[in-house]
Amino acid sequence: MKRIISVLVEKDAGGLVRIISLFTRRRFEIESITAAACERKGYERLTITVLNQDDGGDSAGQLTKQLRKLLNVVNVKDITYLPIVHRELLLIKIQANLAEREEILNLSKIFRFKINEVTNSTLILEVTADPGKIVALQKMLEKYTILQLSRTGQIALVRESEVCTSSLREYPGFDSSLDLKRK
């Protein structure tokens, strides 16, 4: 099962290495990790997407406890089941003739991506969306000749609003008969 962990750390030359080492020692597969400046000067926010071990236990819970013990780690939160806003960025260079360009322009209206560069034979697309939409677009673009593709890891922030139905459905023990139309 995928887990999304948000970590606030003080900037440190070896901090990221210590965090990644902990994940690899615990045999977690890191799907993506993003680290960048955040709202606090001198700190970074990491969003780490990992595949949890299927050992029946709560190894991700243990992992968050061990992350808290690391030097320069200020805050750790497993946000997998919380209502979150999450996004990824995809840059993709496609070889396209005139007819294919028209099809891609139509796709841009549906998927709301930007076309950053156009040459006689190529297009560079920029897509910022939730990971599911990124995957859906990638599948739609497979029929074209993809020259280059670069995809960031996801970033996420916890929503201040009360409910995010999609994340609640994945929560263990979720009762689907509950009225989720409340806000």
Image: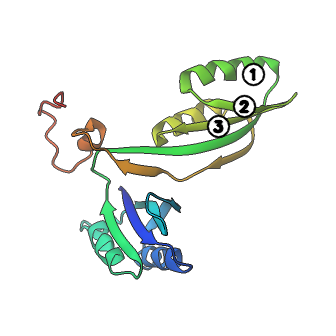
N-term mark: 3 or 2: 3
Q: In the image, residue 84 lies at what x, y percent?
A: 34, 45
Residue type pointed to by label 1: Glu
Give the mark nearer the N terminus: 1 vs 2. Answer: 1
Helix, strand or loop status at disc 1: helix
Q: Residue furthest right?
A: 120
Image spot of residue 61 (x, y percent): 27, 68
Q: Residue at x 42, y 61 (%)?
A: 50
Mark 3 Cα-neighbour bin, 10 Å: few <14, some 14–19, many ≥20: many
Q: Are marks 1 and 2 in contact (CB under 8 Å)?
A: yes
The type of residue carrying mark 2 is Tyr
Question: Residues under labels 3 and 2: Cα distance?
Answer: 16 Å
Q: Amino acid at mark 3?
A: Glu
- Report the residue marked by disc 2: 144
**Position of 114 relative to 13 (above/below):** above
Quadrant of the rendered image containing residue 67:
bottom left
Q: How many circles with numbers are drawn on the protein?
A: 3
Q: Give the vertical position of 69 relative to 183 (above or below).
A: below
